[in-house]
Image: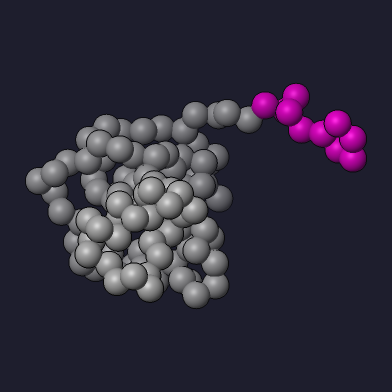
Amino acid sequence: MKNINESTIFSRRSIRSFIKEKKVEQEKIDILLRAAWYPQDLSASIQNILLQAAELGLGSVWIGTYPDEKRIQGLKKHFNMPENITPFAVIAIGYSKDKHKFIDRFDSSKIHYNKY
């Protein structure tokens, strides 16, 4: 079993600074898309992509779009999308400029059982 510090779910971080010269390989993009299960649930699909990206050594960040109409219309215009398509989110993926490590943010004082 992996040490908690090495576990993908605990070590994944939102990465906003990527190495521009290092492109993500098509094989990794295909793996990420397979991890999505798009028809089932978009939010769960995005989380799966983020976790799989971390497992592949890639950095990522989920940029929420839906239900913000201004963001939706901006993406539709930017990507020249048809009117019947509604973008849900943008996921930026690449090779992180920085190395990130596990940060334990768990606070047991915030846990309540059957009462607040």
The foreground one among 93 and 27 is 93
Magenta stretch: includes residue 112:
yes
Q: Is residue 57 left or right of residue 62?
A: left
- In the image, 55: left or right of 116? left
Q: Position of residue 3 (x, y in %)?
A: 53, 41
Picture quarter containing residue 31? Answer: bottom left
41, above or below 21, in the image? below
**Residue 88 appears in the picture as rendered:** yes
Please tell me in which quadrant of the rendered image residue 100 appears: top left
Res 82 → quadrant: bottom left
Q: Quadrant of the C terminus?
A: top right
Name the outermost residue toward the left.
21
The residue stretch that appears in magenta:
107-116
Q: Residue at x 48, y 72 (%)?
A: 37
Q: Give the prevailing secondary structure in the magenta stretch.
A: loop
Q: Residue at x 32, y 45 (%)?
A: 59
Instruction: Name the side, left or right, on which 56 lies relative to 36.
Output: left
Magenta span contains residue 61: no
Residue 76, image x and y in percent? 30, 60
Counting from the top left corner in percent of width and height, residue 26 is at 21, 66
Q: Nearer the viewer, residue 98 or 62?
A: 62
Q: How many marks?
A: 0
Residues 63 and 77: in front is 77
Question: Which residue is at a point 27% across and 67% down the rendered structure image?
Answer: 81
- Is 16 displayed left or right of 41 in the figure? left
